[in-house]
Amino acid sequence: MALIIEKFSFGVGDRFAHQGKAQLAAIAKAAEQGVEIVPVWNKSNREHQTIGSEIASCRVAADAAVEALGWEKSHYVDADHINLKIVDPFLNNSDFYTIDVADAIGAPAEESEVSAFIDTVPELIGSLSIPGIPEPLEMTRESIAATANQYLKAVKLAGEIYRYIASQNGEGTFVTEVSMDETDSPQTPPELLVILAAIAQEGIPIQTIAPKFTGRFNKGVDYVGDVVQFEKEFEDDLAIIAFAVKKYGLPENLKLSVHSGSDKFSIYGPIRRALAKTGAGLHIKTAGTTWLEELIGLAEAGGAGLEIAKEVYAKAFADSDSLCAPYATVIDIDPAKLPSPEDVNAWTANQYVNALRHDPNHAEFNSSFRQLLHVGYKIAAKMGDRYLNLLTECEESISRNVTENLYERHLKPLFLD
Ligand SMILES: [Zn+2]
């Protein structure tokens, strides 16, 4: 029997693979409230490289957390944003694959390929009513050709990567996600429909899809964009997925995957409402937020913990250009709002925590400070055992913050309120 992911899944993980238990504790708390959510640990190749960690370490940390908490439901390990070049080391220890084909978006397809594709989807041409979308979609041969030109190559590549993983791990032994989020422009609902038709033809048993939504999904901070438009687009996407599942025989549990999903407080209400209305499932990736809770827990502990949290900031401040460069499109730091390291060194534990903790209504919250630290994990990685030993010493305050952040600020507004 094929591996089928549950309706609600929650992407967790952390830079230094120390917070598995604290993350799982948040999901277990939601289970006590009657909401079944399964954890998916993920760590991208980029993170592994920045930190110098072994790819297998993610599986080890996930299994250890599951064992320690006696978690009896499923858990998964996600090879996040892989492609053919980097997938091999993930093959033995992952059962969820996020196939990233964003780089192939826009690679023009052969004209013959495009017209052959359009001939297979005549139902899309003209006025198409989709249950759940108030107004019919209007597509023409030309508009479908434009979408096919943009996405057909990317879908074919996703098929190639899927078949490679299946040839190595065996069909039905893993969950397949296709991600198109790390690209310039969002996919509209009609584009998503064309993409799903192409994915079905390619024979990819896709269970989650990560489109790019409108608005900015900056790292570690709230959504920036038109929330009303987001809500409409999200609902339309759910309707498109339900339609495509029936029409093209895609897996029945196919659901949306929201990347950079942590801390997007202003869209959690709209997402929860849309899920309740439609009965749809959700996957949401939130791994990025936990490293900041680690810093908060260190600072809260005071003493050496607070000292190292300040040192991480001072070094991140000095090195901000190179730390920010790989994340340029997903952060929005106002340099004028960054406190000087001298100022931060004079802060109390409370001041540090208040500036960093994601409470946008707190007078001392500083989103530039938070975003710089978000991309500053490389500094902590370079500190090696000195940093890791403090994680153990300050475990109480760190794990308390990690669990509370995921439960109170993420799981509750998304699934429980
Ligand atoms: Zn992503």
Image (cartoon, rainbow, N blue to C red):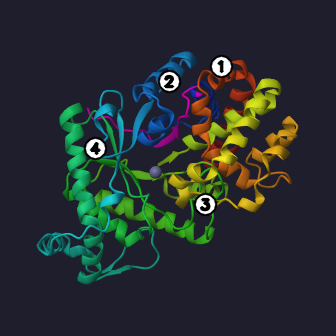
Circle number at residue 389: 1
The vertical placement of 167 against 360, above or below, is above
Comparing 83 with 322, the one in front is 322
Magenta: main secondary structure equals: loop
Question: What's drawn in magenta, residue-wise?
Answer: 1-19
Please provide percent x and percent y for residue 130. 38, 71
- Residue depicted at x 26% and y 52%: 158
Of mark 4 and mark 2, the one earlier in the sequence is: 2
Label 2 vs label 1, nearer the camera: 1
Residue 392 falls within the magenta-colored stretch: no
Left or right: where does residue 182 sit relative to residue 287?
A: left
Label 2 vs label 3, nearer the camera: 2
Please provide percent x and percent y for residue 378. 57, 38
Element type at mark 3: helix
Of mark 2 and mark 1, the one earlier in the sequence is: 2
Of mark 4 and mark 3, the one earlier in the sequence is: 4
- Residue depicted at x 62% and y 43%: 376
Within 10 Å of the Cα at label 4, are there few (<14), some (14-19), or many (20+) other Cα atoms? few
Residue placed under numbered mark 3 in the picture = 270
Within 10 Å of the Cα at label 2, are there few (<14), some (14-19), or many (20+) other Cα atoms? many
Circle number at residue 129: none
Residue placed under numbered mark 4 in the picture = 85
Name the residue type under label 3: Pro
Within 10 Å of the Cα at label 3, are there few (<14), some (14-19), or many (20+) other Cα atoms? some
Q: Is residue 118 visible?
A: yes
Comparing 227 with 312, the one in front is 312
Name the residue type under label 1: Asn
C-alpha span from label 4 to label 1: 34 Å
Left or right: where does residue 359 sit relative to residue 132?
A: right
